[in-house]
Image: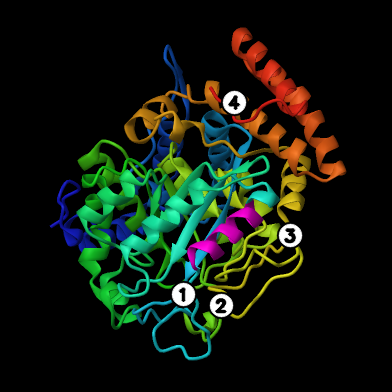
Amino acid sequence: MYNVKSLKAEEFINHEEILETLEYADKNKNNYELIDQLLKKAEPKKTDRGVECSGLTHREASVLLACDDPEITEKIYALARKIKEAFYGDRIVMFAPLYLSNYCVNQCVYCPYHLKNKEIPRKKLTQEEIKQEVIALQDMGHKRLAIECGEDPVNNPIEYVLDSVKTIYSIKHKNGAIRRVNVNIAATTVENYRKLKEAEIGTYILFQETYHKESYEKLHPAGPKHDYAYHTEAMDRAMEGGIDDVGLGVLFGLEMYRYEFAGILMHAEHLEAVHGVGPHTISIPRVKRASDIDPSVFDNGIDDDTFAKIIACIRIAVPYTGMIISTRENESCREKVMGLGISQISGGSRTSVGGYAGYSPYERPHDTEQFDVSDQRTLDEVVYWLMKSGYIPSFCTACYRAGRTGDRFMSLCKIGQIQNCCHPNALMTLQEYLTDYASPETKRLGEELIAKEIMNVPNEKTRKIAMENLNQIKNGNKRDFRF
């Protein structure tokens, strides 16, 4: 039985409820009166407190996704752009993945790190190697990392992850510093989540891969990850362990995309109902080629247009969550979906263990890659591209470091007030990047952008302080200002 407040995976992600949702969506996909009502319901509304948005339920949003009328799709896109602008403006947060180890005891059939893959060399970074990787990332200009490692209690115990987080935060190189470490590791215990919280991680990220239990068990035939319930209930344990910000994701292409779409929205609704705050981020990766992995064997692949519509519908349904797209996707795809709801992207990424230190910006090792990187541009090229496209690349980590996480972040985000902090913070961290790392062409374009955008800070006092801070950064006097 479906129960959004249940702590049992098969009740808050209920198979029958999803099937009924898909049937309801098919029945109403040409019900234009209902669709019009849903679009109006999801519109951002100005209130005395700021801007508010109601979002949509998994069942309502599934109707929009099922509708194949091109005119309705354009209305969906327009609304998604409007919502994204209301809560995230033109800012795009930058990050990079850091792979610590590819040792893994699972046998996931879509991942090259699976236990039986003999083609891929196994590697685990020492703390000294992690230091060199972090320095290389700092020299690129990154301030925010997402660390990744396979599940292996012998090679990758929680103590290794905790030591690695401590190492990353400890490294101050020239003007560089990693200010936020997000963690993407296997489902674990409440006690271990408490340890991650004490280590001051940012967001805990765990991809569900698929919400379809039968498919999940086939795709994970052996290893700890085979346990569907333990994996699906991980976010509840993380929040019980004190982690405020969690990140959901599914791997599109493994199962029917409309099933996954309903499932991830149900998971978001569950977190909101039980913990009072939904997911901090939602990621939308697609299956990609890798060592020993041929994505064509999965018969649920989705094209770019369907992918874009999924992103737009998630933005409408869960208006306040951050949405992440990685370098799995190529430049043209990322450009298409950027305005439809994406708020975070990776740049200059390596998906191999030890892929940064000792390599030039245009050189990358392939032997331990988790997946093919489609967008292979450098961070500087990505920053330039974003600004040329009308976006503000942001290296900001202020909310996390000021304690604006979990429900404190969402309470500000839900009325649009977070922008009073985010806009000037984005400009100040962009100025850091321009001063310390950017190519001359990127620096010129960026400083023109900042000069224009600083005038859009509505509060005169905030604007004046931000302008003074920008000058200090330019003159090399100080870094790390934040509101």
**Is there CB contact under 8 Å for labels 2 and 1?**
yes
Q: Residues within 10 Å of mark 3 (few under 14, many from 20)?
A: some
Which amino acid is tagged 3?
Arg
Residue 166 place in picture, x, y as percent: 43, 51
- Mark 2 or mark 3: whose residue is earlier in sequence: 2
Q: Secondary structure at mark 4?
A: loop
Q: Identify the mark nearer the N-term, 2 or 1.
A: 1
The spot of residue 109 in percent (x, y) is 41, 82
Between 321 and 451, the one nearer to me in the picture? 451
- Residue for badge 2: 368
The residue to which callout 3 is attached is 377
Q: Which sits in the foreground, 380 or 449?
A: 380
Q: Secondary structure at mark 3?
A: loop
Measuring from the top left, give residue 124's x and y in whole percent: 47, 73
Task: Check disc 1 and report the residue beneath it.
Answer: 102
Q: In the displayed structure, would residue 286 be above or below residue 79? A: below
Residue 160 lies in the magenta stretch: no
**Is residue 8 something one can see in this rendering?**
yes
CA separation in Å, label 1 and label 3: 24 Å
Pointer 4 residue:
481
Left or right of 405 on screen, residue 372:
right
Mark 4 or mark 2: whose residue is earlier in sequence: 2
Q: Tag on residue 123?
A: none
Left or right of 98 on screen, residue 275: left
Q: Position of residue 404 (x, y in %)?
A: 40, 30
Q: Which residues are magenta?
A: 126-137
